[in-house]
Amino acid sequence: MLQSLRNTWLFNIRGDVLAGLVVALALIPEAIAFSIIAGVDPKVGLYASFCIAVVIAFVGGRPGMISAATGAMALLMVTLVKNHGLEYLLAATLLCGALQIGAGYLKLGSLMRFVSRSVVTGFVNALAILIFMAQLPELTNVSWHVYAMTATGLGIIYLFPYVPKIGKVIPSPLVCILSMTAVAMVLGLDIRTVGDMGELPDTLPIFLWPNVPLTFETLAIIFPYAAALAVVGLLESMMTATIVDDLTDTTSDKNRECKGQGVANIASGLLGGMAGCAMIGQSVINVKSGGRGRLSCLVAGSVLLLMVVFLSDWVRQIPMAALVAVMIMVSIGTFSWDSLRNLKQYPLSTNIVMIATVVVVVFTHNLAYGVLVGVLLAAMFFANKIGHFMYIGSQADDDGSQRRYKVVGQVFFSSADKFVAAFDFKEAVDKVSIDLSRAHFWDITAVAALDKVVLKFRREGTDVEVLGLNEASATIVDRFGVHDKSAPAGPETVDQLMGH
């Protein structure tokens, strides 16, 4: 018990605490901004960020990953809040959590193995672009002081780690935020601050149950939104967990993370917060600032609440330029620059999948759409490639009365037409044998292709023998094939199989 506590909570106390402080400061303006996007009071996003971060620290499956209110989730809430109000959003948040817990028990987190590296790379690059684009409003139509402070903040972030002794001890983003705040306060600069983003809450969150009727009509209203929130939340969380796995060279329990996200969202809904999920930007900040364990997420959530409730007068003074500098650092650090250098080396299909994922995510601002397009393209390219790895050779007997075909490779929907086209049905032979000992039949399209070949040979008056089916292929052929059934196969059967 003590060893487990030490391994997950206490192995990196200084790094986790300092990283948590940086993340807490960076969470405040984002939580407020996401609340505004969703059309709710800023405290809804702040309470959600506090609650989700604290709960996920205990029940999540990826230590060091930060979860809170996010923009991807906020975009899905706009219509629900506009048409039905906050109470229905809280109800949808509870249902979203329940669906995510169910996904965890169904082990849907394991589906991440079907997401290719090119899709993950495209996802990461798209998020880096979106993070940078989100900072542009803070750099548009502003005074030169903002540009100067942003540039100075970036200088501190990238140069402070080279300072002897303390450069590696204190996270440079924390130094940037504190120093830029001090400069803005001392010089009295008239620039945009966190306080200008919205009113900060002055009380702790309280337990509440959504004030909605418990009827099927309510369920019909909230279920589509809850399902969309659950899918997008899990998708972003699983992708972020994969990225943090790579950054820290460790593994995570994706199915536990699914259940943890659900528990955290239920807790958020019961405390007046909106649904959230893992945040790639904050997670990268946490990792690059030295955060590795569960303590970093707990500190981030706890300090966030303490600051906005008890230190709000100080928090309001933080200049947005300092936080913009931190987020630009995150954007630069998140983008996979190797993916650009490798464009000439990687296969065209890999580049198309990556670029398509980026384009769809950036233009729709919907991570689910981009990943879905990427996964579908990757699956199509893979199926097309595997479909080409099939060879069919043949050899005739000396007297020309019999021909033996030998099939090597995978027969499925992509290679079925190639399989059928490899046979010469007009050749005048008495008997044809088809050796499938080095082939595998994967689906009913492949079985239908075998039926076409056998039945068409028989229609030409040729005796057909199928040899060497492995156990798995024999099972699917026995179940769905018609060429080996007792019923006679007339021309109409063959025509139907051939798609005529």
Image (cartoon, rainbow, N blue to C red):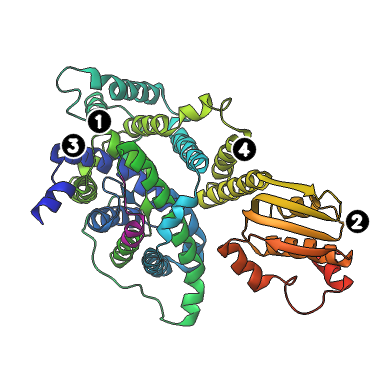
Residue range highlighted in magenta: 251-260
Which of the image's four quarters has the C terminus? bottom right
* Amino acid type of the residue that numbered disc 2 sits on in the rendered structure: Ala
Q: Is residue 448 visible?
A: yes
Mark 3 against mark 2, which lies toward the viewer?
2
**Mark 1: which amino acid?**
Thr
Magenta stretch: dominant secondary structure? helix
Q: Residues within 10 Å of mark 2 (few under 14, many from 20)?
A: some
Secondary structure of the residue carrying tag 4 is: helix
Mark 1 residue element: helix
For the residues carrying marks 1 and 3, which lies nearer the camera in this image? 3
Label located before the other in sequence (3 or 4) = 3
Instruction: Work out which quarter of the rendered image holds the N terminus and state it.
Output: bottom left
Residue at the spot of label 1:
181
Front label number (4 vs 1)? 4
Q: Is residue 272 above or below residue 134?
A: below
- Report how far apart the C-alphas of labels 2 and 1 lie in the structure: 89 Å
Task: Identify which amino acid the numbered label 3 is placed on.
Answer: Gly
Which residue lies under the disc numbered 2?
A: 428
Q: Earlier in the sequence, mark 4 or mark 1?
A: 1
Horizontally, residue 54 falls left or right of residue 146, namely left
Vertical side of 88 occupied by 341: above or below: above
Q: In terms of depth relative to the viewer, which is nearer, 201 or 327?
A: 327
Residue 428, given in percent of the width and then of the height, sits at: 91, 56
Residue drawn at the location 45% of the way across and 52% of the way down: 112
Q: Residue at x 26, y 36 (%)?
A: 317
